[in-house]
Image: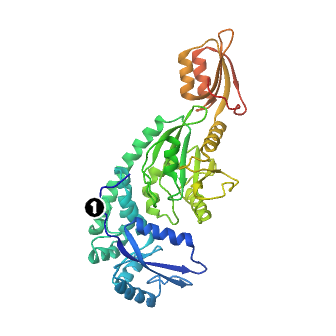
Amino acid sequence: MHSTKEPTELERVLLVRAYIGNESEEVGSTREILALIQSAGGTVVVQESQKRKTPDLRLFIGRGKADELREIALRENTSTIIFDHNLSSGQVSRLEEVTNCKVIDRTELILAIFAGQARTREAKLQIELAQLRYALPRLSGMWHHFSRLGAGIGTRGPGETQLEIDRRRARSRISFLEKKIEEVETRWKIVSARRTGMFNITIVGYTNAGKSTLLNTLCNTCLYTADKPFATLDTTSRRMILPDGSEVLISDTVGFIERLPETLVASFHTTLDIVRKADLLLVAVDRSSPSRGRHITTVRKTLQRIGVEEFIPRLTVWTKCDAVDDLRYPRTGVAVSALSEFGLDALLNRIMSHRDRSLDWFELVLEYRDSAILHWLYKNCVVRNVTNGEDASVRVLAGALRGYDSVEGKMDEAKLVRNFVRLPEPPETEHAG
């Protein structure tokens, strides 16, 4: 997807990282914060760090370091300082007074990225709500942004300019947005009700793990993708055909990241709800990333944080395997490459096995072939095999999407069933007849 917009000059940024206690610098985390700043429209011209036993209550860093930042910013002609940490409103306000620069913390940086990436009306509502919830208790400190610099990272959003409104108007706007998002949630519930009975798969993972690219390849779609954090904010669902010819629903949603802001988790409740209701989670992990272990831990903790139950089956999908040499590793999960299509057949078969184990399988014999009954079975079950008997009877081997009771009730109405047998486990894979 190409943009017709003229390239804009990147905002010059001074990046500050503090290592508290036993914390140490990690290559992957450094690369990540640089990518986040670039995605927000900035470029890091200077990096500064400080080792501390505990954060300073007033400035997070020491006063001497803050004075040094002011001199560096003046020398390097930058008026924006970004901390890879979450700061209190008081710390931001005092840092801006000392450095004479706009100060952005990690949460505000991520919110700025979301604001810039929002494309749909739903995403824009959710981002504006998250920004207002973040800004409301911090308005006095955030006024420094507006008085010093009226543009740039952290000073724009998809709705009204949040930094110009007072607390009363902010609360009023929050109430309005919550009602609008409730309407969206109601529509989502209606759509979800129509899909009841389908096996639902959701792709989750760290941001930029290749989730949307994987969905595009599996479903032959052309969703927007980009090699940057949070390229996709909206939930997208598509039908996917399994090797036995049956269909499942597969969804892609917003990526996770370390220290995902609480305001985003709250505002994206509707979007993340699809993760909680999934029958199978595909946990996408970038195999080529040196920080993949840290990413796996973050995804697991984020799933717990948003209330995803442990009993929902999970399948690890190691993505971007075209960028690594050893495809034998790892032993668990499935290694794939969406670009070369390596491992996709194995992935589809693993998905089908998970789906099959979730169904109530049965065998029934109809007195004769009835097209209406067979149509109902194909719509409400995974039909594995249909065989015609010599006496005009029809044997059906299938798995119930809504449980045994739904099938038995329907067959009792039809009064065509000669025999109905529940099967203790999925039958061996055969293509539907």
Can residue 133 be seen by looking at this rendering?
A: no
* Residue 139 image-quadrant placement: bottom left
Q: Residue at x 61, y 14 (%)?
A: 416
Residue 328: percent from left, percent from top: 69, 54
Colouring scheme, one of rainbow, by chain, secondary structure, one colour: rainbow
Question: Is 354 or 125 nearer to us in this picture?
Answer: 354
- From the viewer's perspective, is 49 left or right of 330? left
* Residue 382 image-quadrant placement: top right
The extreme right residue here reads: 424
The residue that disc 1 covers is 160
- From the viewer's perspective, is 430 left or right of 374? right
Residue 138: percent from left, percent from top: 37, 72
Q: Is residue 35 above or below residue 424?
A: below
Q: Is residue 105 above or below residue 70?
A: above
Query: What count of labels does the image hold?
Result: 1
Can residue 249 be seen by looking at this rendering?
A: yes
Q: Residue at x 60, y 47 (%)?
A: 342
Q: Residue at x 37, y 63 (%)?
A: 131
Tag 1, which secondary structure? loop
Question: Is 204 or 404 nearer to us in this picture?
Answer: 204
Question: Is 145 or 132 nearer to us in this picture?
Answer: 145
How packed mark 1 is, by other alpha carbons closer than 10 Å (few <14, some 14-19, many 20 or more), is: few
Q: Is residue 408 above or below residue 127?
A: above
Q: Which three-letter amino acid code belongs to the residue tagged 1?
A: Glu
Q: Check the picture and name the quadrant holding the C terminus.
A: top right
Q: Is residue 211 above or below residue 145?
A: above
Residue 72: percent from left, percent from top: 39, 86
The extreme bottom residue here reads: 64
- From the viewer's perspective, is 335 left or right of 85? right
Residue 273: percent from left, percent from top: 49, 49
- From the viewer's perspective, is 75 left or right of 313? left
